[in-house]
Amino acid sequence: MKTDNRPREVIGVLPMGAVERSPQGPPGAGYAGGDTQGRTEDAVAARDAWPHYGGQIPSLKRNGIPFLNDISTDPAAGNADELAHNVCRYREIPALQAGSMAADGPAETCVGLVVLDCQGRIASVNPAFTQLCGYLPSDVLGESLQMLSYGGAHAEFCRVMWKSIELGGYWSGEVWIRRKDGTGTLTWLSVYSMQDGAGPACSYQVTLADVGSAMLTHEPSGYPQHLPPFMALPSRARFMDQLGTFIQRSQCASTSTALLLLDIDHFQEANHALGYEACDRMLMAVAQRLCTVVQDKGLVARTGDDEFSILIGDACDSHAVQVAAQAMLDALSESFALREGSVYVTTSIGIALFPGDANGADDLLRAAGKAMRAAKASGRNCYNYFTPELELQTPNRLWLAHDLRSALSQKQFWLAYQPIVSLKTGKVHKAEALIRWQHPARGLISPADFIPVAESTGMIVEIGEWVFRTAADQVAQLRRQHAADFQVSVNKSPAQFHRQTELSESWSDYLRRRGLSCRSIVVEITEGLLLEDSQRVDDHLRLLREAGVQLSLDDFGTGYSSLAYLQKHDIDYVKIDQSFVRNLVADSKEMTLCEAIITIAHKLNMEVVAEGIETAEQLQLLRDAGCDYGQGYFMARPMSASALDAFLAPSGNGGNSALKG
């Protein structure tokens, strides 16, 4: 009699995840229709299926015998086109019992199969195991499953796993395994105890399902859909599962787990300057370098467009975590050789520890995120540990957002003006307007604290309009009393370009209505705005230029600078960032960069302003290099409008007298 080994199929209908109707469950599983009706799917299968899922899942028959279940689920609409059911199709893949799982098993199966003898040594494997891991049967027969461990399994983890198998006859979970070529892959490992009667286990059956590819096609909503195929790293969903596992290990073994949240600085600017395809290749190199640093000491996952999360277990030694973080910074500071040329990036890393900084996974993620943002606020290209003081930032942000709404109407803002000095003549015919917030209860609040809140809430548009109009009114007075060509520079946030409505009066129209030349105001923008490649931004800049308003590029050299954007938008001034000026000495790298910026700007018919001049030596070096203008504490600090008026008077420091140097 010939046996029909073709897979058989049945269909089940699941409302809200419970089996409503199925003749016998998966065929051959031994379930009657009543056994599965009303039961959740994980009562039959070893793990939940994804929506629209199709694949092979290790499952248990009613008698406890494991088998491979080929399952697919699809949503079905009910009344009013609402999702009412999931239609599940089951097919049993035969020949998975220990006695029939021979080396000539089905090669097309995506699940590797291994039989261990009672001593835990490998007795047989199927072709899919070789395809997944790269090992031939002769490489593994008689060896322990430990040989597949990627970086060495934790003793506590192994103890818990085998204890679970001893008590319940089954264990499953995500495990990194080592391929023959030394690389690691994330697998769903299931181990079943095979018993002959009521005695001890006579063998063990192991299934290994590769989840590295599944994570790219079954990603939850909200995760970047353009994740490139080269990223053989756990996804965010997989990472969250592993984070829970690491925390459980720490609780069992009374150790610590370190979470390092790494974010690439100015990544969106790189996307616009280099293109998405080039940035994907750069991300691949970033991932490789991180994995090289971490090796078997932890887990690396990509959890955002430009964000990587690194888990380090047994992190009782904080010095080791610090060394790892610095090693990551050093590894990523080296140039990335792309077809487009050499690219340099910097990163900011936030570090949080369990249980010291958090009670669970969500708290640990929040703590690491706050530490990472603190690293960015500290100047980027560094790491920062979570501290209790960072907890105060969220309440601070809430009250900032609340109090900002009334600050303008209650006239709590005022403008400070920092003179900009001509390095050729020493005259002061320019100044930069800088907003200040004098809170009635909290005193003077730094713009670095409230401007990001204003941008994120949209209040920056109203505040920015007030800054512009106040500066315009002030420059009218300065032109009447001191110099007919006086200019005031006003910073315009990228958020203002995007949120400003067509109904609002344009800046050029306001200047004309006040009887002012459009050249009385200089609009300062950042490099990031130019790199956005936005038609709306281009149109706003074009209208300003056509009206005669001059443009100044702030913090030049700190982002992904592009000369093409300088030419496209007809920039008038380039401001050298104070980070280059701060350490400026003769024959230094900073000096070389400043000289290069000045030379390029002059070739493109732009003038140069150096920010942050604090010493006579810096002033002289910039003057000798041909820099046109300078501002900084060495010449004058930011001052009130009345103080600026006195400063510019003939008897004041900035009147008609040139700087001596």
Image (tube, rainbow, N blue to C red):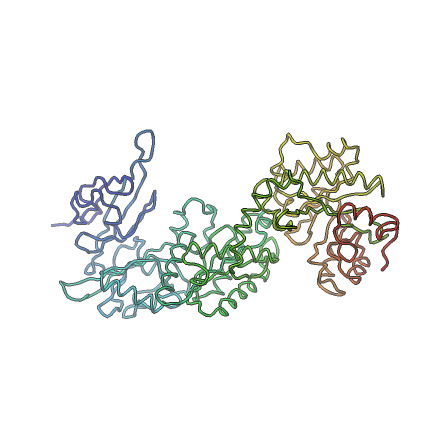
* Residue 263, x across and y down, in percent: 53, 55
* Residue 413, x across and y down, in percent: 67, 43
Residue at the (19%, 60%) spot, across then down: 99
Residue 360 to residue 77: above or below: below
Residue at the (58%, 62%) spot, across then down: 334
Residue 99 to residue 643: above or below: below
* Residue 314, x across and y down, in percent: 42, 67
Q: Quadrant of residue 106?
A: bottom left
Number of numbered tags placed on the structure image = 0
Tell me the quarter of the image containing the C terminus: bottom right
Viewer-closest of 540 and 410: 410
* Residue 379, x across and y down, in percent: 62, 57
Residue at the (23%, 40%) spot, across then down: 20
Could you tell whether 424 is left or right of 1 in the image? right
Viewer-closest of 463 and 600: 463
Q: Residue furthest left?
A: 1
Viewer-closest of 521 and 549: 521
Viewer-closest of 89 and 634: 634
